[in-house]
Amino acid sequence: MRGRADGLLAKVESALTEASAPGGPMWPEDLLALDDRQAFPSDAAEFLDEIGAPGFYVDRGNGVLDELFDLTSFLRLLARRDLTVAVGHAKTFLGAVCVWLAGHADQRERLAADILNGAIVSWGLTERGHGGDLLACSVRAEPSGDDWSLTGEKWLINNATRGHLICVLARTRAEGGPRGFSLFLFDKRKADPRTWTTLPRVPTHGIRGADISGIAFAASRLGPEALIGAPGAGLETTLKALQLTRTMCCGLSLGALEHALALGSAYAGRRVLYGKRLAEVPNIRQALGRCVATLHVAEAVAFAVARLAATATSEMAVASAVAKALIPELCQEAISAIGEILGLRGFLSADEPYRAFQKLDRDHRIVAIFDGGTAVCRSQLIEHFPLLAKTTTDTAGGGSLLAIQGRSAEVTSLSLLSRRCSLVARLDADCERIERQAAAGEIAEWIPASALAARESLRVTRARMAELSWGPHKVPQEAFDVARDFELCFAAAAVCHLWRHGGQGPGSGEALWASGRWLGGALSVIENKLPHRPRAGAARGDAYGSLADCLLAQPDGRVPSLFGSSVRSP
Amino acid sequence: MNTAADLRRLAQLEHAFGDPFESGNPFGFDRVLEADEAEEMFGPGEEKLAEFGLNAEFVPSSLGGRLDRLEDLVEIMRAVYRRDPSLGLGYGVSSFIAGVNIWAAGSAEQQQLAADLLASGRRIAVAYHELAHGNDMGGTQCRAELAAGRFTLNGRKEVVTNLERSEAFVLFARTAARPGARSHAQLLIDKASLDSGRFCYLPRFRTMGMRGVQLGGVEFRDCPAPESSLMGRQGYGLETALRSFQITRTTLASMFCGILDTGLRTALRHVTGRRLYGGPAIGMPHVRSVIAGAYADLLAADCFASVATRALHALPGETAIYAQAVKFFVSKILIDAMNDLSEVLGAHFYVRDGETAIFQKLLRDVQPAGFGHAARAACQVALLSQLPLLARRGWTERSTVPDEVFVAGSALPALSFADLAITAAGREGLSGALTSGLAVPSAGRLRRDVAEIAEYFASDHRALAASCRDLDIASLGISAPPPAYDLVNRYVRILVASACFETWRRTRAVNSTTFTADQRWLAAVLHRLRADACNRPKSLPPELADFLVQEAADRITQRRGLAFAAPMYL
């Protein structure tokens, strides 16, 4: 089961490796210095243009539904080296995605050509004062003959200053509402420069070199060709586009955690305290192993959700919200745990071999915020409670939700409301297989209990979803906690489904797949947080310690990934 | 509450500094942030603290200073931390740590020298740290060899606050090559006595947080130092340090509470002024829950640290335990609460300018709470090795803890450095105080949740004793099996639950009208402690969340601090 662009990803990876050598455009020393100076990594961006990275941002036919995981993986390759580069370059996909979903053929072709020529595209959604509340958006576009006139200010926009084009969400009905907004592709190169201005760069906690700024329009004129999709469809298109971007930006978390693990592993392998190497201290091994297992959970979820875009397209509202809420949170937790191992060494910002840590820790915290923060995603999930409570089990088991076969998915299948969640519906059947494997001695005997804890938790969680009710604007905190429980069950389902349907092909990390090594670790991470844990504290082998061994056995900078070299799909 | 003189000094200090949020204030956050951006100490703040005579707070009154009660010192230092943690650490704390060691082990002449230096506004640094050994002070390599009536210094000290701009420093050095605890000494070195050709300063160490703090290093090359610089007996340096650390670990962790106080105020101000989804953000139950949770965490941290601080006066034979527990618990809960708060700030926690800009600085500055001046993990291991003895001795003997340990502002015995025991020899009464307190009939009507959770921790104490009694001490060093580390987590939660329960119960017996006597804060803290024990979401019941949000909002309106002492800001 290989991704379509595996070959391309491998080429990118080797180019990145070369570019990371001293003096190269991705040399880590330079990237850290740029962060210090708050300068954009222009050489790195130029290099990415040269190796054809923009090709990843261009739709190859179906709104990129089939290739979403390529994007996730590409983003991860950048992110594990430098999040500023990843965020600063891949933004072009976010700027373009609404055109891939809703633009007409002409617009799509033009934009594709532009991007392949190196055009930078930005996405203007947020405004000062109301962040993720898109219905409060106040930039307005008024018809003026055949044209439109755009007025207002977009703020905290990635690449608003560097970008050549910007996809803008604007109010087209004074009263707003779900059909009151439209999308426009604003081309700075064509617009009258007196009618727009970029806003000063906003200094940020992490990704200090990124261009986080804004743009103000004053009756900027847009031709009719600037409108993306139907008038009034802007919010709907945006929300559908977010389903895809929230999925692919999991790659940022995967890359950041991978980078942190590489640093933590190198440190533990060298550091001697109280006469022992940290790598030999059982509690440190346990902590590192748990972080590896967390990476595997995140990989499984990121992969499953990206594939669901093609195999269960209409369910992406739920799946993408789950991924975007859970993955940055789990990964940050693991990054912080590695930070605790590094201690002062992860806090020093100069003349220190592990100083990349303090940057990635600051950088990664942005991931939980953008494209809809954790609370926004959980709110979206909460809206689905009545439907999710009713989702029935797929007793037949069904085929793989992870394999893309034959016919391409259609963007018209994307929906703002997921009627069901097929992935969690498979949990029963996947658990049964895990039980059979344990009975046959193919995997450790304690593993099924962890999977069953997730199955039982899912039942409990659905029951709570059905019970909860509340008044307008008063979603109780309890609902957020139930949403998180569902995310954990979803993660367990992704892990079990991937275990069942992945892993046989070449390129998968064989040592991890042998006898359920990664499966046990991943399920343990999840189980430890579940609402239903029948055997809390029961022995479960040395799942984490064995993953730590995998980590510490890797050559420097490598991290055991479910995807083998971490550039291929399982 | 604190003494009247302390309150006057605190009011004087806050008055001199003015409202930190006011943009024109020369001592406000805008200026603090400018210094942080420049990686410099906040100059006007330092001048103001010199004018205030902050150093006198570190000098015992017997030597002409103002240090009588450690809780008063903590309260003053929290005011500094609330404004600028770099100022707290970089102006004050290193001289305080040096001072404590000098008061504990220095000769009369050395104490007078130190007192005079501090009285005249000079600094004394603490040169303990070596990058190669971190918390493993026994591994110290920097040597001080005594021959022919003088010491000869060789080796390096690294990442030492104010090393270059101090007049003197306390040096921790190896005096004998043999490994073990009796091979070190502390020297008080007056820089004027050193030959400037025999030592050199290392370049400044730069850090992600506390950026203004001047972290330096020194390298000695056959550098002579007078024999009279020895503090205490040669070979006893580690013991002196371990006794002094009981004071500094406890009080420093407590000072960090000032960071969360400002973090909470910043977050609450933000969500009060912000409108989202058609209403004020503070009206959303999720936002309220996060704010209230962080507030409960501040109260737990404050309560536990304050109990341990008063115990330094009243129970110096037991604080070898409490100091480790405070460092372990308080640092983590403060860091976690700041992380939680960042969620309700959304993108505003990530932005380095505007009204919430101080938050990202605090988020960076709080990190050293976890590893500075002893890492959490080192404290955890130290506690771990104590568990069997505690289970066999202290937890069965049930010593009583006097009221003054729980009731703020009670008369306390004078601080006695000589009475601080290097080991508690398995005796501490705090963890058992919960069980005794629950048994007192006058405990009165407990809320049902309080009774239930308190009983949960009391019963876990019994279970813990059973698990620890027969542990093999030899297996409990740094290489202990990971499940053993969990025993420490359980133990520390019991200590905190006990400190909070008894603080509420015994304060109420004295004055039932105070906030401390209100059972709801206790209920909130206990809810979160138990959720933490179960690794489940720590959300509070809405009634408790409402209570804490209202309390926080009222205190902000009244310009009072958020912790128990609730000092007036102006």
Image (cartoon, coloured by chain):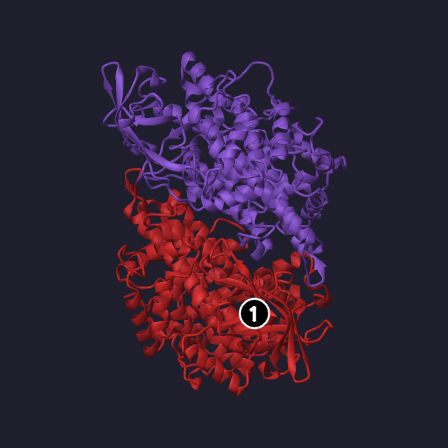
User: As displayed, is residue A12 above or below residue B285?
Assistant: above
Pointer 1: residues within 10 angstroms few (<14), some, or many (20+)? many
Let me know if residue B524 appears in the view: no
Q: Which chain is red?
A: B
**Count of residue discs:** 1
Where residue A97 appears, x then y in whole percent? 44, 24
Where residue A393 appears, x then y in whole percent? 56, 29
Where residue A46 appears, x then y in whole percent? 51, 30
Task: Please name the residue shown 31% across and 37% down the image.
Answer: B277
What amino acid does circle 1 point to? Ala
Name of the residue lying farthest toward the front: B197
Q: Quadrant of residue B160?
A: bottom right
A560 displayed left or right of A319: right
Name of the residue lying farthest toward the top: A106
User: As displayed, is residue A319 above or below residue B285?
Assistant: above
A94 displayed left or right of B246: left
Let me know if residue B204 appears in the view: yes
User: As displayed, is residue A43 above or below residue A229?
Assistant: below
Task: Please name the residue shown 60% across and 63% down the image.
Answer: B380
Tell me the subunit letter for badge 1: B
Name of the residue lying farthest toward the right: A441
Find chain A in the image and tell me its colour: purple
In the image shown, does B431 or A214 lie closer to the viewer?
A: A214
In the image shown, does B26 or B500 lie closer to the viewer?
A: B26
User: As displayed, is residue B233 above or below residue A400?
Assistant: below
Where residue B36 appears, x then y in whole percent? 41, 55
Q: Secondary structure at mark 1?
A: strand
Name the residue carrying label 1: B127
